[in-house]
Image (cartoon, rainbow, N blue to C red):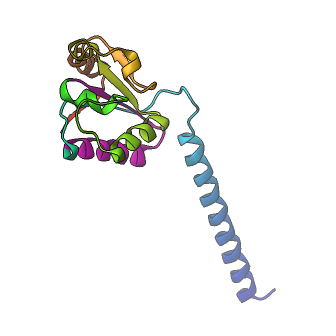
Amino acid sequence: MTTRRKLLAALAGLAGGALLSRKAAAQQDSAETLRFPGDPTEHNVIYQLNKSSEQYHDAVLFSVGEMLRKYGDNITIVVTAFGPGIHLLGKKPERMVTEKNKQTVKSLAAYGVKFHACGNTMDTLGWNQSNLYDFAEVVQVGAADLLEHQEKGFAYISL
């Protein structure tokens, strides 16, 4: 074998080895990020939803969606609704909620976003669980829900 052929063979071997090690590294990275249902998430955030305007709803729901797109299944997102914001979770809201935002809330819930409704606000409105979408969970005090999640390490977002 000539020196040139030996050199080409060696380079081919190195290139093949580099490709194999790159593939192995990619598989290792994907195994490290592989998550199973119920595994704790690295990122946790709670949103305050306490206003009834369409633009406000748009902003909160857009932000929630962006967090899902960025972190996928490695984030726990809770949206706590109280005061005028609770109407976004109502089957028949008493304030204006666009059809688009109703559908967005349902879609986000299907992707695992948790929606909490303030029991105190519901009492004031004369609402009970049947007035809310089935995925909404009633908490006694919305503001306390925000506090307790922050104490558990959740980042707090208020737009």
Give the residue at the far right of this rendering. Answer: 1
The residue positioned 30% from the left and 24% from the top of the image is 153
- Residue 56 in the image, given as x and y percentages of width and height: 20, 42
Queried whether the magenta region covers residue 152, the answer comes back as no
Please count the marks in the image.
0
Q: Is residue 134 left or right of residue 21?
A: left
Q: Is residue 61 magenta?
A: yes
Q: Is residue 63 above or below residue 12?
A: above
138 lies above or below 71:
above
Q: Position of residue 145 (x, y in %)?
A: 27, 17
Which of these two is toward me, 113 or 153? Answer: 113
Say if 6 sits above or below 156 in the image: below
> Measuring 47% from the left and 33% from the top, which residue is drawn there?
112
Quarter containing the N terminus: bottom right
Q: Position of residue 92 (x, y in %)?
A: 34, 30
Q: Residue at x 22, y 33 (%)?
A: 95
Q: At 46% from the left edge and 43% from the top edge, which residue is drawn?
A: 72
Picture quadrant of residue 13: bottom right
**Relative horizontal placement of residue 125, taking residue 131 as reference (left or right):** left
Residue 121 figure quarter: top left
Left or right position of 109 against 121: right
Q: Is residue 63 above or below residue 19?
A: above
> Which of the 4 image quarters holds residue 86?
top left
Q: Which region shows up in magenta?
A: 56-82
Q: Give the side of residue 70 with respect to residue 37, left or right.
A: left
In the image, 73 versus 115, the foreground residue is 115
Q: Position of residue 20 (x, y in %)?
A: 67, 61
Q: Quadrant of the C terminus?
A: top left
